[in-house]
Amino acid sequence: MDPNELEAIARSAGRPRAVHRDLSLNVREEILTAAAGLFEANGYTATSTSSIAGVAGLRQASLFHYFARKQDILLELLARTVRPTLKAVRQNRLEQFDPDVALWQLVHMDVANLCQGPHNLGALQLLPEARGPEFEWYWRRRYQLFRVYSDQVARGFVSGAFSQGDPRTTSEVVFGLVESVIIARPQFRRRTSTPVAIADAALGVCGVPVEQIRRVAGTPAAPESR
């Protein structure tokens, strides 16, 4: 069944919207967008489900049809900062590329993901409540993503493509460069050049010469697995 039909049925079955909205819009996405803005502006604890529902144009009872708990909303927002990159790592065969190319592409797509959208979802990990046990799933996936970086950096040192520092420290520095966008000015996050600049800087940390970085940046992206 068409998603619009499903939404129309849901609305007629006792979950009316408080404010009329275009049925082509995904209600779940509206809730997430509203919550992201409120969490960013007011914090997690100070944001109520009723306020999220209000911004999304829903009655509070309707919100619970899409998310059973407020923590589920935050967890989904946090997941969006790591899930796309982990999925791309599974789909793209980075190992077919030289280590410098693979790392550049990894950094580029990760930064691009963190910089997309109207809200700084990456900064939500800094909320004190995000350290609670109910968000353990996110922190496990974030560490899994760090391990991807570590593997690519280690591969570069083994091959001789990287020549500066030691693998563990270099991995942490590169990962820190990527996550620096979450505390950067909004203007920096919005620039289309930002993913390229950080990917270039990551290779610089690994000791890759500038002229080689320029060649790496021109390498076509890894194809997606079908």
Image (cartoon, helix red, strand yellow):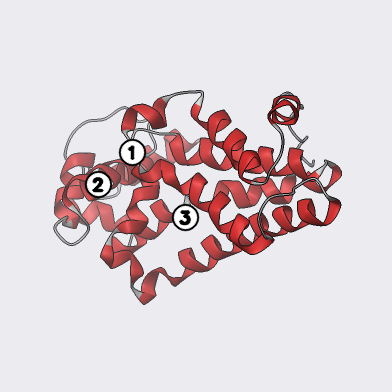
Tell me the residue at 39%/51% (across/down). 77
Q: Residue 190: image x %, image y %?
A: 40, 27
Q: Which residue is mark 2?
A: 40
Q: Whole-Å distance between the Cαs marked 3 and 1?
A: 14 Å
The reply to whether discs 1 and 2 touch (Cβ–Cβ < 8 Å) is: yes
Question: In front here: 32 or 206?
Answer: 206
Residue 1, can we see it? no
Question: In front here: 217 or 84?
Answer: 217
Above or below, 163 relative to 220: below
Q: Amino acid at mark 3?
A: Ala
Whether residue 107 sits left or right of residue 187 in the image: it is: right
Tell me the residue at 35%/31% (across/down). 23
Q: Residue 94: image x %, image y %?
A: 77, 45
Where on the picture, by quarter, is residue 132?
bottom left
- Label ID, residue 79: 3
The tag earlier along the polypeptide, 2 or 3, is 2
Q: Which residue is mark 1?
A: 119
Number of marks: 3
What SS does tag 1 mark? loop
